[in-house]
Structure formats: C-alpha cells, structure tokens
Image (tube, helix red, strand yellow):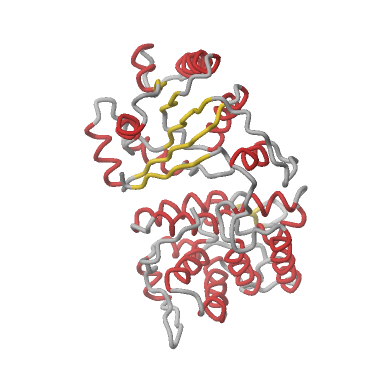
Amino acid sequence: MQNIDQNWTFPYLPEPPLWRIDWQQLELYFGWLSAMRNCPQDPIYHQEGDLLTHTKMVCEELVSMNSWRAMAQTERSILFAAALLHDVAKPDLTKIGTDQRISSKGHAKNGAKRAREILWKLGTPFSCREMIVSLVRHSSLPFFALEKPNPSYSVIKASQTVRSDWLAMLEEADAKGRICADRQILIEKVELFRELCEENRCYNQPRSFSSPHSRFLYFYKEGSSLDYQAFDDTEFEVVLMSGLPGAGKDSWIRENVSMLAVISLDLLREELQVAAHKNQGQVVYAAKEKAREYMRRKQSFVWNATNITKQLRSQLISLFHSYRAKIRIVYLETELEEIYRRNRMRERSVPSSVIAKLVAKLDLPDLTESHTVDYYINP
C-alpha cells in the first residue's frame, strides 16, 4: 500500500514562500481540534501544556524542516496530516491517576482508527489515507524500537505498511515539539531508529523477502530467520474476504472466483436460523467444519464474511495454515455514504449504528498477515 496517489492536497496545507500554518482556519474546519485544547498532558513529558499546544508545536517543527519542504505536495500533505492527527485519540483516553500522573494508554492504536474515520469522511484517497493512518499507528515506534524484545522484527514489520523515513521525520518533529527534560534523548532515539531501519534495509521501502511464503512465515511466527528461504509447501488456496457490509464482497466473488466453493456466514445464519445480533458460535462452528472438509480434500474455497479485525482474521489464518493453505486476503471498500445506502437496500440489512461500530473497529489487512493481499477500492 506504499504507492501514493499524487493528486491530493490536505486542507490548508502550508505553502511556500511563507509556509505559514493557518491555525484559525484549521480549527474552524476540524472540530476535533477543539477537544485538544482542554486535554491535559503529563507535566514530566509535556511541560508545554495542553494537547493542542503540543500538536501545534509538532506541526510547526515539521513545517520548518527543509526535508519536509523539499517533498512533493501530496507527500507534504500526508506528513502534515499525520502530525495534526498523531494524538487525536488522547482526549477520549486521557486519565488522571491517584498520583496525579496523566496517561492515555492505547492512544496510537485508537488514534489510527479515529484518523481513518476522519480522513474517510474527508474523501482522502485510499493510499494517502492509509499511509497517514499507519504513521499515526506507529508514531511511538522510533522512541521505543530499541526497547522492543526484537527491535529488527519491529521495524521490519512496520515497514510493510509505513514509510520508515517519513515516520522518523514525524517523530523528530514530535520530539522537538515538546518541553521536557529528556527532549534531546528522544531526538537521539529517532536517529538510532533511522540507523536500525537502514541496517535492516527497510528505511525508505518495505523490507523485501525471498518469496511471499518466506515473508508469511517470518511474520506468522516471530523469531523466524529473516533470510530463510522457505520451501513453499502450500497445496491449495483460501480466499479470505474482508470488508464492511455492503462493500461489494458478494459481487466480487461472482465476478472473479465463481468457480470456487464459498462458505458464507450470512447464508449459514439463514440455514441455522441464527439472527445476526445473537451468539454466532453455532454459525462459526458450522463454517469451520465445512472449511475443514474442503481443506482435507485440498480444495480451494472462499471464506465470505466481514473479517474486519486482525484478531478475527488471525484465528482463521492459523486454521487455514495448519492445513497448508496459501492465504489470499481480498479487501473491498467504497465510500461510507454508499456503504450505508447499500445496507439499507439489502434484504439482510443491519442497523446503521452497527455499521458505525464496525467502521470504528476496522483493521485493514496487510502483508504481515497472509501470502497476498488485494485491495479493491470503490469497485
């Protein structure tokens, strides 16, 4: 997903020759910025004050960088948007402990999902949106990469979805855009992160592997050898569909893999007379039993369900891999307004509130999960 659409500009992007950030217009345009104004930060790490003050300082530091100014307009847009959004989830997650210490646990992961919702509604091109989301998701990695149990694995995995050189630039701005005792240490950590990525050949491109199967095994089982050229013992293929209700999964299957058997959780619910809002244990059990029948025969098939979270996909992928399947994830997406419209027209429609919750939970599949990932956007 690192091929970027070059025809997009973020609203109120600072432009030459003044490179001035129009904060008044940005705050009028993005209502979520106002929530940052009243969000406190831990005074040990952020002596500059509230979250909006920090966000403004980060953006100003980024815009002052010659390396940022030298980038193409769309690339500048991506990094500026990431700087603006990197702490977007903090107002909802910030807590003050009994010791008066302030924390916002999980703000990067939740911020990535919040950023996706904001940018999706804004009409941001998919490739640009997901790069921004990945920058927000991994925004703390340069500060903590060397403290991870396996630093090389951490940066190589991140490189499959994010430009590590852009991530380093963002976090350099984050380190400089704060007042704290260890500010210089944070800046030095970013430099060490750059060196770590260079050493692992993933600084300005995803780390490459000898084959899709070698890549799959490396990420499937952390601790696998990076340069191991795995023998591909897969014997059939499972197509794992992923996408919100109404994204076009059924149509894609009819038009592209109609020759394959299909396990549809929607159809199984009808057969077993289990409502979508009821416990799905019986439906999932029946689907997995059917999958095992196909896999014992080494027969390729399609697993058709929303599969929008990485946790759910990982359980299925583990099952398929145990039968030596080659796993192909197919993700479909269209505009949110179209998703809601199609849902209203479906015979098996779900409440709009359910769609909204699914949007908030969405984890896009990526190449750390399977042999292949295909994205069909606005099919």
Q: Please provide percent x and percent y for residue 183.
A: 72, 72
Q: Nearer the viewer, residue 214 or 149?
A: 214
Q: Is 71 left or right of 339, judged from the image as shown?
A: right
Q: Is 45 left or right of 358, judged from the image as shown?
A: right
Query: In the displayed structure, would residue 55 be above or below residue 254?
Result: below
Query: In the displayed structure, would residue 297 be above or below residue 163?
Result: above
Q: Is 277 left or right of 352, judged from the image as shown?
A: right
Q: Nearer the viewer, residue 98 or 91?
A: 91
Q: Please provide percent x and percent y for residue 335.
A: 31, 48
Quadrant in the picture for the C terminus? top left
Q: Please provide percent x and percent y for residue 227.
A: 72, 46
Number of numbered discs present? 0
Residue drawn at (41%, 51%) of the image: 117
Q: Nearer the viewer, residue 362 or 228?
A: 228
The outermost residue toward the bottom is: 17
Residue drawn at (49%, 19%) of the image: 299
Q: Is 321 left or right of 279, judged from the image as shown?
A: right
Q: Please provide percent x and percent y for residue 346.
A: 25, 30
Q: Nearer the viewer, residue 96 or 181?
A: 181
Query: In the displayed structure, would residue 286 be above or below residue 53?
Result: above
The outermost residue toward the left is: 345
Residue drawn at (73%, 61%) of the image: 199
